[in-house]
Each structure stands twice: as C-alpha cells, then as structure tokens.
C-alpha cells in the first residue's frame, strides 16, 4: 500500500502545482501551529495540504510507520473548491483516492 500512497501524494503535489495552488513561501510558524482541523482558521486548504499533510505523510512513509487509516479530506475539499468544481475535478478525484486508499487499510 505504501507505493500506492506515494504515487497518490506525488499526483496530489503535481496537481496542486498545475492548478497554481502551490506556494513558494511557507506560512509563518503561528499559522502552522493552529490546533483546529486542517488549520482552517489560519491556512487555506491547499496550504494545509502542501505544508502539513504532504510532509507528514512522506515522513511516515520514509520512517515506515503506520499511516492514518481514518481520514476524510474530500468533504472539505469539495466545499473549498465547489465554486469551480469542474476546474478542480482532477484534484478532488486524487484527494478522494487518497481518502479511500488510506481508509481501506483498516
């Protein structure tokens, strides 16, 4: 499963870049320290994906540690990108596959 997750993470990063949602500058430490889900009070979802989700998953994979097995990013992604869901359909599909792949590991 780790190879499938790695592939999906690469696809997610690629799609964020293609959609011009990839940031060259990380958020400040205070924004990253939010305790709310998805840092919704301090970060945009794409920032959370880039600066928190992707690095954490890569770190777990690199250390061969257990991956989360109950995630649900797709609902908030659908809400976030609903204004232009056609443009973001591929991004939403990738996020949905990540949710499904990790949740199937239960």
Image: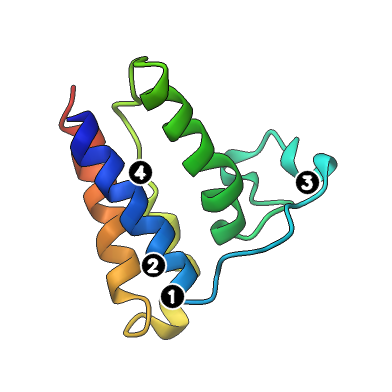
Please identify, in this view, whether the residue under mark 2 or under mark 3 is nearer the observer: 2
**Mark 2–mark 1 distance (CA, rounded to whole Å):** 5 Å
Q: Which residue is mark 4?
A: 72
Circle 3 residues within 10 Å: few <14, some 14–19, many ≥20: some
SS type, badge 1: helix
Q: Mark 4 or 2 closer to N-term?
A: 2
For image coordinates 26% across by 47% down, the residue present is 7
Report whether 63 appears left or right of 106. right
Q: Which residue is mark 3?
A: 31
- Residue positioned 46% across, 83% down in the render: 83
Describe the element under mark 3 as helix, strand or loop. Answer: helix
Work out how far the residue at label 4 is from the one at label 2, CA to CA, in angstroms: 19 Å
Where is residue 57? Give x, y as percent. 43, 33
In front of the other: 99 or 64: 64
CA distance separating discs 2 and 3: 24 Å
- Seen at 50% across and 32% down, the residue is 56
Q: Nearer the viewer, mark 1 or mark 3?
A: 1
The circle drawn on residue 70 is none
Q: Earlier in the sequence, mark 3 or mark 4?
A: 3
Q: Which residue is mark 2?
A: 15
| Secondary structure of the residue carrying numbered label 2 | helix
Say if mark 2 contacts mark 1, CB within 8 Å. yes
Residues under labels 1 and 4: Cα distance? 23 Å
- Determine the image quadrant of residue 82: bottom left
- Crowding around mark 2 (Cα neighbors within 10 Å: few <14, some 14 to 19, many 20+) is some
Q: Quadrant of the N terminus?
A: top left
Mark 1 highlights which residue? 18
The Cα–Cα distance between marks 3 and 4, rounded to whole angstroms, is: 22 Å
Disc 3 vs disc 4: Cβ atoms closer than 8 Å? no
Mark 1 or mark 3, earlier in chain: 1
Give residue 75's position: percent from left, percent from top. 37, 56
Nearest the viewer among 99 and 12 is: 12
């Amino acid at each position: 499963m780790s190879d499938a997750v790695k592939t999906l993470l690469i696809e997610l990063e690629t799609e964020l870049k293609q959609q011009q949602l990839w940031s060259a500058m990380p958020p400040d430490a205070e924004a990253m320290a939010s305790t709310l889900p998805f840092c919704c009070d301090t970060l945009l979802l794409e920032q959370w994906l880039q600066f928190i989700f992707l690095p954490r998953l890569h770190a777990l994979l690199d250390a061969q540690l257990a991956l989360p097995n109950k995630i649900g990013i797709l609902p908030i992604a659908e809400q976030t990108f609903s204004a232009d869901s056609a443009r973001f359909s591929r991004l939403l599909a990738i996020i949905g596959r990540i949710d499904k792949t990790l949740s199937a590991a239960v």
